[in-house]
Amino acid sequence: MFRAKWLAVLLVALVSSCANHPEQGSRGFSDAALARLESTIAADVERGRIPGVVMVLQRDGKPAYVKALGKQDPQSGAPMREDSIFRIYSMTKPIVSIAAMMLVEEGKLALSDPVAKHIPELKGLKVGVEKDGKLEIVAAQREPTIQDLMRHTSGFTYGVFGRSMVKDLYTKNGVDGSDHTNAEFVKKLATVPLMYQPGTTWEYGRSTDVLGHVIERVSGQSLDAFLQQRILGPLGMKDTAFYVEPAKHSRIAEPFPKDPGSGAAQNLLPIRSNPKYLAGGQGMVSTAADYVRFAQMLLNGGELGGVRIVSRKTIEYMTTDHLAGMRGAPAVGYGFGLGFGVRHTSGQASANGTGGDYTWGGLGGTYFWVDPKERLVAVWMMQAVGPRNYYRELFRNMVYAAME
């Protein structure tokens, strides 16, 4: 009886949500299944597993489901809002990748260009190979290219994830810090070896941070100015930037002070003032509504509301697997394009989906995917590091379960 009453309450809430969004409709989704998604997430919020979330589903370019649940700030008790602002971490990467492809379309950059053509400080990089407990420095067989940066086959890594002798040098030499400009960052990066030979292995790392500085060198603009002028402004992404302006501080979503699962402190990026480091791979903030606009532009083949960002063929090219059997992959069933994880088939992966869908997420808990065959954009926004992978899979499975 309790379950039936709870479902009835949620169905009323779903109808109310649609009333707040007159343009919102089922668009091929089951109302009962969406209510089940909502009740599942609401129950986890109530149990204190996550502070809160904003979920958006858009199909055929129109909202099918928009919901904010829980707390925007668990310490102040401020409720989650549909326009709450989140640290999107690595969901910065697709935006910066699109920016680079704009320069490719204009003939100012080529994917085959060696990175050192635009950043001479990175010329002549060596590769670190661990042998018998020692780090051997060997010559690179070729220079990493712009394409390598975009598909994470450059040999650059993250020192903060996992352990290796090369990663230890990243930490020792300050590569993973933030007290530097983009130009100072690449100078630090030049002091450490690559982890793999360029073009041989998918290794998630600082590649898109380097790409951000390539954009600065080629365009003559700072990364934030280029993105605002060429992507964020034209798409109407009014709350997406490298920091949150003081007038918007009341909308910042925050995590629990400590992760409920591990008890570890959650110290996310400081975003209340303009940063020194404009990290192209991790530094931006956004809202669910803004990121839906960006993702819809991708689904539309590079255009939104009459504004053309890149060509249809550029989007097709970027969202096709570029790894071609190289070592490493973002997940089982996925390859990697130019800025996105790309699903090979509807099977293989542990979560539901469609062959050809493309996706990425952020360390702080955010996630999105685009499913061209289902004409679907899905965005999940929360600030919770530890359970991020669990909720990505849960959200995916329950969204596809709701399709009629």
Image: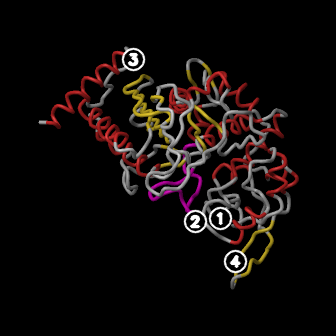
| SS for callout 4 | strand
The residue segment tinted magenta is: 318-336
Residue 323: percent from the left, percent from the top? 58, 57
Residue 67 image position (x, y, % from top left):
39, 28
- Going by the numbered disc 3, the residue's amino acid type is His
Looking at the image, is 398 positioned above or below residue 57? below
Q: Could you say which disc has been placed on residue 21 in the image?
A: 3
| Mark found first going from the N terminus, 4 or 3 | 3
- Is 306 left, or right, of 224 in this rendering? left
Q: Which mark is residue 200?
A: 1
Numbered disc 2: secondary structure: loop
- Identify the residue position indicated by label 4 in the image: 130
Which residue is depicted at the point 58% across and 41% down? 91
Please tell me whether mark 2 or mark 3 is closer to you in this view: 3
Q: Are marks 4 and 2 in contact (CB under 8 Å)?
A: no
Q: For the residues marked 4 and 3, what is the alpha-carbon distance in whole angstroms?
A: 57 Å
> Callout 3: 10 Å neighbours few (<14), some, many (20+)?
some
- Rendered position, 78 above or below 346: above
Quarter of the figure with the C terminus: top left
CA distance for labels 4 and 2:
17 Å
Q: Secondary structure at mark 1?
A: loop
Q: Main secondary structure of the magenta part?
A: loop
Front label number (4 vs 2): 4
Q: Secondary structure at mark 3?
A: loop
The numbered disc on residue 327 is: 2
Which mark sits nearer the N-terminus, 1 or 3?
Answer: 3
